[in-house]
Image (cartoon, grey):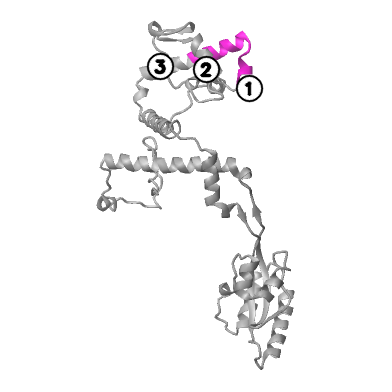
Amino acid sequence: MRFRPLLSVPALSVLLFSGCGKEGPAAGSTSSPPAAQVKGTPVVSFQGGAITLEQLQTYISQMNPAARTRVQSVEQRREYAEGLARFELFVQEARRRGLDQDPEVLEAAKRAMVQRLLHKEFEEQAAPVTPEDIAAYYETNKAEFISPARGRYSHLLVPAPAGSADRAAKKKQAQALLDKARKLQPLDFDGFDALVKEASGDPEAKPASADTHLVTPGELKEKLGPEVAAAAGKLQRVGETSAVVESPKGFHLLKLTDVRPERNQPLEAVSSMLRTRIARERREARVSAYTEKLQEQAQFKTDTAVLEKLQVDVQAPQAEATGPVPGYLPAPQPTR
């Protein structure tokens, strides 16, 4: 069972307009009390309730300035007030028909209650994120905001230790491989990987072993030597290939496969983003801890043996819905 629209588009737009700017009573989530119990000055009266001047004043105060421009004239105010009253008439009629006990209405109410509980427990009671909190978080995660430039390379080596008898021949081999590399398209990394295999003399060699991953110039120097690091520093665009580089280990070719520029974001530049992130992470941690507490208090347990009997046929046709989609909350994250 699913709801169908009960109101025309113009009428619905009035209802939506009543809540512009802020979620609250103007959205029509609560009905007016009986007329005899109405507190305030009635503006629109009807059997069983009224819309009061005080209510309207509160609702309008919660609207954003743009929405308020649409209730300037007396006629616009009348349309707004009567729209709220008409909504209450529909609420009364729905209750008269017992729709307040409809499964989908009850499910929607449960969802609203859970959302309100989450808001009250984790929004209203949230401690403010202080500048000191932000500064500490920044220092702990500084590598995310300040880091040197890095490059990633595919490294081809024709082994020829210094003093080896075949070093001259190996240099010619490296030059021949360079000639082949320069005939490749700049982004033909697979083609360069094939040359890496050829240089190793092992057709089963894994090109991944030639991947330097992202490294700083200093890390590359430590890994492959100063000659190779100096040649890498001359490569600027992804796809560029170095000249033959001679080192005590042999002859090298490098192909630049990725570039990560230097990152230098001072605290002031990321404070707003960090404030939001810290608040979110704190909220998630508190929700997880609160969920675990509720589960423990309720002796929450799952019978896995029974669960294994649940049948899930991904090929079966979808059955017609017979009720509302149930609410769902994910498992709590491990608390630190």
Q: Secondary structure at mark 3?
A: helix
Q: CA distance from mark 2 to mark 3?
A: 24 Å
Report helix, strand or loop for mark 1.
helix
Question: Which is nearer the N-term, disc 2 or disc 1?
Answer: 2
Relative image position of residue 88 (x, y in whole percent): 45, 16
User: In the rendering, which numbered label is found on residue 278?
Assistant: none
In this view, the residue in front, 98 or 277, is 277
> On the picture, is 328 further left or further right than 178?
left
Quarter of the view holding residue 36: top left
Q: Is residue 286 above or below residue 76?
A: below
Q: Residues within 10 Å of mark 3 (few under 14, many from 20)?
A: few
Q: Is residue 70 magenta?
A: yes
Residue at the spot of label 3: 93
State the residue position of label 2: 59
Rate crowding at label 1 as few (under 14), some (14 to 19) or many (20 or more) other CA atoms within 10 Å: few
| Left or right: 237, with 62 as reference point | right
**Residue type at numbered disc 3:** Glu
Position of the N terminus by quadrant: top left
- Where is mark 1, residue-wise? 66
Question: Residue at coordinates 39% horizontally, 48% vertically from top-left?
Answer: 335
- Amino acid type, callout 2: Tyr
Q: Earlier in the sequence, mark 3 or mark 1?
A: 1
Which residue extends farthest front? 132
Q: Which residues are magenta?
A: 65-85
Confirm or deny contact between disc 2 and disc 1 (CB under 8 A).
no
Residue at 60% x, 82% y is 200
Sequence-wise, the earlier of marks 2 and 3 is 2
C-alpha span from label 3 to label 1: 33 Å
Q: Position of residue 84 (x, y in %)?
A: 50, 15
Q: Nearer the viewer, residue 81 or 261?
A: 261
Q: Nearer the viewer, mark 3 or mark 1?
A: 1
* Residue at figure coordinates x 56%, y 25% from the top left: 21
